[in-house]
Image (cartoon, grey):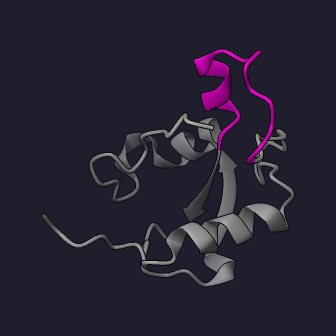
Amino acid sequence: MSKSRYPDNWNEIAFKQKEKVKWQCQKCGVQCLKPGDKTAHLSKSDRAKLTLVVHHSNYQPEDNREENLICLCTACHLSYHTGKRGNISIGQLSLDLDF
């Protein structure tokens, strides 16, 4: 198994970025779900659409400078990776829907 290109504290880095932008997509402006939000009324698909991820602008997961990180909803994040413009590893864009 290969070593992750993400740092051991990636979850902490990503959480801080999401908090900084108040869980809002920096591309389209959609308000995404925060930990603890009530989601029982949402379908699995709707929860997925409202999931905020942190994208590396230069597609280098090792480069975690704040100016290289952008918070995106799932749709905007996938649009950045369309056409394999990035270096997506297997499972990188999978969603953890256990809120």
Q: In percent of the image, x 49 and y 81: which residue is there?
A: 63
Name the quadrant containing residue 20.
Answer: bottom right
Q: Can you say which quadrant of the picture contains the N terminus? A: bottom left
Q: Verify whether residue 45 appears in magenta.
A: yes
- Which region is colored magenta? 35-51
Q: Name the spot of residue 32 as percent of width and height, x first.
A: 77, 41
Q: Verify whether residue 83 appears in magenta.
A: no
Q: Can you say which quadrant of the picture contains the C terminus? A: top right
Position of residue 2 relative to residue 25, above or below, is: below
Which residue is farthest left? 1
Q: In percent of the image, x 29 and y 54: which residue is there?
A: 89
Q: In percent of the image, x 55 and y 36: which residue is there?
A: 98
Number of numbered discs visible in the structure rendering: 0
Q: Name the spot of residue 86 as percent of width and height, x first.
A: 40, 57
Position of residue 52 relative to residue 46, above or below, is: below
Name the quadrant containing residue 13.
Answer: bottom right
Side of 8 where 87 appears, left or right: left
Prevailing secondary structure of the magenta residues: loop
Position of residue 24 relative to residue 4, above or below, is: above
Name the quadrant containing residue 47.
Answer: top right
Q: Name the spot of residue 54 as percent of width and height, x first.
A: 61, 59
Q: Name the spot of residue 87 as percent of width and height, x first.
A: 34, 59
